Image (cartoon, rainbow, N blue to C red):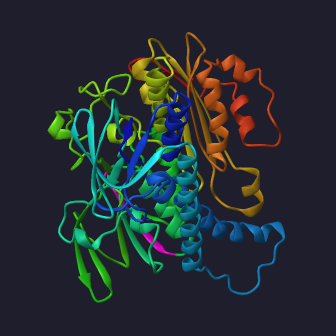
Amino acid sequence: MCVLPFPRIPMRFKIHHVCVTRMVQVGICELPYSPISSESTGGIGGTCVLRGCVPKKILVYGSAFSGEFQDAREFGWNINGDITFDWKRLIANKTNEITRLNGVYRKLLTGSKVDMYEGGGKIVDPHTVEVQETDGKSKRFTTKRILVATGGRAVLLNIPGKELAITSDEGLSLEEFPKRVVIAGGGYIAVEFAGIYSGMGAKVDLFYRKPYPLTGFDEEMRAVVASNLEGRGIHCHPETNLKKLEKVAGGIKVTTDKDEVFEADAVMFATGRKPSTKNIGLESVGVELDQVGAIKVDEYSRTNVPSIWAIGDVTNRINLTPVALMEGTCFAKTEFAGTPMKPNYENVASAVFCQPPLSVVGLTEDQAVKEAKGDILVFSSSFNPMKNTISGRKEKTVMKLIVDADTDKVLGAAMVGPDAAEIIQGVAIALKCGATKAQFDATVGIHPTAAEELVTMRTPTRRVNPKGEVVKA
């Protein structure tokens, strides 16, 4: 089997582990390692490990200390003198860590007898892949199965001066810390980087097209996140787009569609990613793509060409690392373990590592109204976390449960607040098991914690009918 590169290596290793167990010869083609991706660079570990989840979370940790220093005073800590931040030290440590991980995954793969080829891969026919290696040599490999797992890459807004902007790739590896940052976008990456740079001391202006950031998430939670961003010193500009970038003596001049003008040291475009399907030979064998360039697959991740499969972000299903892991595992079990298995996309939990973080699982309130056959019950709670009552930070934790009024089944859960991702991960197990609100109510809470609120919300905030109308509290 031949595997073209994919940016989520834990999933890829799982496939090889299964394949090797069945004595299947496996080869991987991957571009040379670099912290910043390009047409000619990539690396084992891919987006998640090298220029996504892992390095981003390291920077989130680093930026969170400024808030901790502020809160510490009311807990009795006398912080005397200047507290300074060394961006270059953090970036060096981050780069050392992802370089280490790149080596770890390479060792895991070679230890599992996976053949590694460094260079660009291209499908020549339904059973042949050509690899252009970094030494200039070209090799062809014939295989029964080809797995395309090339992921996606960040894109730049098509506006004048776009060449002056950076994406999240470069944002994780800037040589100098930008004191003024403009970010375009309202999704995960935009919101997270706004918190990172602001927490480290930059002036951040965040521009997004909708009234609130994080389109697709629960409306109430989006409003809370927007309020928290402002509370952390980030200047939000809803319903505003960037129109033009210009190089000026002081940095970059930014003009919006409202003819407002800003100056920045760095402008980040965080407006989405596109599947990496160009120049890998898909068109030569007739693999079908959708309107955004993603590979079309069936419920088993098979393309319209019987010998070619595709998984992960290149298929544009749910673009999350653990989902790619699931898809890869299902592919391996279906094709090599004799156990046909389809990926299950119900109740996939996710988190946005803004500060404080947002985490969700299951349906939003709007989705539940559309999908439930009858009324839904909404349970919500907003409160000051215990830590904030002492520190004085004006930042509430908000929790929400969506329940089917007829079956009592919990359809969705959401939380904005400290440790939200850790808490919702546990709730996701309950939803996967079909838990009811009565079972949540019967669970004894851990006191004092924020998480206990999820099992002590007894009275519904509102009841909503299939038309979206509030019928009673």
Against 278, is 361 above or below? Answer: above
Q: Which residues are magenta?
A: 202-209
Residue 247 shown left or right of residue 88 in the figure: left
Residue 349 shown left or right of residue 366 in the figure: right
Question: What residue sits 73% from the left and 22% below the top?
Answer: 441
Instruction: Residue 315: say if magenta.
Output: no
The part of the image, by quadrant, that contains residue 67 is: bottom right
Query: Which of the image's four quarters has the C terminus?
Result: top right
Residue 161 shown left or right of residue 214 in the figure: left
Asked whether the viewer can see residue 6, the reply is: yes
Measuring from the top left, give residue 285's x and y in whole percent.
Answer: 18, 35
Measuring from the top left, give residue 380's x and y in whole percent.
Answer: 61, 34
Question: What residue sits 28% from the left and 28% below the top?
Answer: 303
Question: What residue sits 26% from the left and 38% below the top?
Answer: 128
The residue lying furthest to the bottom in this view is: 249
Residue 258 shown left or right of residue 416 in the figure: left
Q: Nearer the viewer, residue 261 or 321?
A: 321
The part of the image, by quadrant, that contains residue 119 is: bottom left
Question: What residue sits 39% from the left and 35% below the top?
Answer: 1
Label the magenta part by its dominant secondary structure. Answer: strand
Instruction: Residue 207: say if magenta.
Output: yes
Measuring from the top left, give residue 231's x and y in whole percent.
Answer: 55, 62
Measuring from the top left, give residue 450's x and y in whole percent.
Answer: 72, 42
Asked whether the viewer can see residue 345, the reply is: no
The part of the image, by quadrant, that contains residue 133 is: bottom left
Q: Nearer the viewer, residue 97 or 241?
A: 97
- Number of numbered callouts drawn: 0
